[in-house]
Image: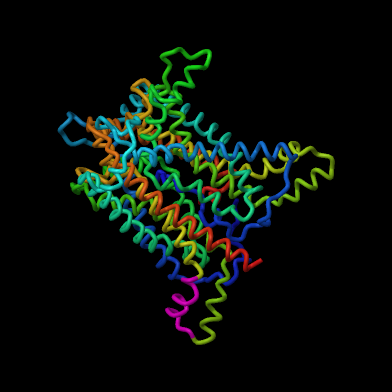
Amino acid sequence: MTMSGGVAPPTFEEVQGGGLTGSDRPRRVGSGWGRRLLTVVAVCIYIYLFLPLLNIIVYTFNDPKGRYNLSWDGFTLANWADPFKDAELTSAFLRSLQVAGIAVLVALVMGSMVAIALSRYRFTGNKVTEVFLVLPLTTPEIVLGASLYQLFLGRNVVLGFSTVTIAHIMFLVSFVALTVKARVRGFDWTVEDAAMDLGASPTRTFWKITFPLILPGILAAALLSFALSMDDYIITDFTKGEFSTFPIQVNNQFRVSFPPQVNVLATIVLIVSVLLLVLTSVRGDRSSVTTR
Amino acid sequence: MARRATADDRGLRKSKWAPYGFLSPGIIWLVLFFLVPVGILLKASLSTKPSRFEEPVFDWNFSNFSTAFGDYGTEFVRSFVFAGIATLLAILIGYPLAYWIATRGGRWKNFLIGLVVVPFFTSYLIRTIAWTSILQDDGPVVALYRLLPWVGADGRILATPMAVIGGLTYNFMSFMILPIYVSLEKIDFRLTEAAADLGSTPWGAFRKVVFPLSLPGVFAGSLLVFIPAAGDYLNNRYLGSPQTSMIGTVVQNKFLVQFDYPQAAALSIVLMVIITAMVLVYSRFLGTEGLAV
């Protein structure tokens, strides 16, 4: 998510409803026809949000006459039969997965540590650190990209896989730290004392008590960070050199072609992400049922 | 909204070194790859590059900044106007959806708000290209558009400011919906019943009670849409034309095509300073917590 990466989307944990006030029953707000109108409007907005995605999915079945898969020329299943037909595109897709995989792992470790420090300890510099963490998210991506470009250029670092990964880790660290922090906010750290009073070592306490408790926050951050990394264009554009991720390759190729395989690969990512979303919200439903 | 670390955070540790140990890897990374590079960018903005192939020389060259305002004022103004309109549209479109999910979502809430994030999972570039397909000149959307009385038979949407603003609005919409949803979720809607008991109409209750309480979310969302929109160049590249070029277009072109680093750096710094000023004004009134999305 995109996010563009310069700015992170709102804390998924908050959004996913940890410690929220209201009941889960629909509230009766407003008059009957007003509520119905709002529902119609909401459905229209969902259609608007999903229109481009629908376009992407429908065009996986298109059989374009030219080299651009942008106008409808006829139905075919051939694109799905051969999703990896375009070798350049496929390898760029795999490179995107690699960058995202490494960047998300590193950012998760570093970001979660920052979140633990901020929520578990009282220390001088606490406030400054929080403001500092927000800055990368409120700086336009183009400035983040441009400044890294100048840094690497000035030190004669060859732009490529590692510089792109470094850049992605940078914007994800802040995002993970703030997301996990929102999750751990108000967390009762005395459970650690309880574990240690009962004879657990600090290491065992961390892995058996603390880690499982912050794990949902880390998982939500992981999912969104992965999307932000896969989604990113601008910061990657400045740190890529001759290297290319999936979006960069699509853009480079767009001057000569836009093959249906772009849509097929994008749709595969979409299907996997929606499945993950359904799985997590089903699990969320069950837990909210048992706690009520 | 801000919930400061207070005494009610149970079991908060006091330790001299441990917090810094936890902080250091992440913070060192941010210092090395965010703070230091911005400093280098600032230095570059005050340098002179004698020719395309020579190294820039640092010489307190402030003329890059006067050129930034003098020659690229139009692009700056256009970027901020486009981003401003996109932000307003995002509020108008995003607020009703966030409100509907928060008040009517019931047990599907998590799923419904999750759906808002789904577009993120296809690349932002590919979504933008999908819009070029939807809005193409011989497509159904443009056919309908041409029926409007003030649009001619050759009216088009692509390559107009409308398309660029539409793209910016769409691409950053989720950043608006999520914080508004979070702030609406915190509201105790029994307040509207109290308002009704006191003789308020449903609309009056919304306008005087619910909406003011959701403002932190609206403000956070506005920054999260405005910032990436103001620095964007992809929407203009695919949906716009040279007549709609934004400041991001100029910066990208100067850095990566013309290699005019000092001028490009000065333009980036100006953009950053204007936006940071806005963020500071924001956080002065509302704190940074709401942005900690």
Vertical position of residue B90 compared to residue A90: above or below: above
Residue at x-position 51% and y-position 67%: A120
Residue at x-position 75% and y-position 45%: B192
Residue A257 picture quarter: top left
| Image coords of residue A23 (percent x, y) | 68, 57
Furthest toward the right, the residue is B198
Left or right for B132, reference A128: left
Instruction: Report if residue A209 lies within the magenta region.
Output: yes
| Image coords of residue B17 (percent x, y) | 43, 70
For the residue pair B147 and B200, the one nearer the viewer reads as: B147
Classified by dominant secondary structure, the portion drawn in magenta counts as: helix
Residue at x-position 33% and y-position 42%: A263
Furthest toward the left, the residue is B53
Left or right for B73, reference A154: right
Highlighted magenta segment, given as a residue range: A200-212
Residue A275 picture quarter: bottom left
Q: Is residue B41 visible?
A: yes
| Image coords of residue A274 (percent x, y) | 45, 52
Instruction: Report if residue B143 lies within the magenta region.
Output: no
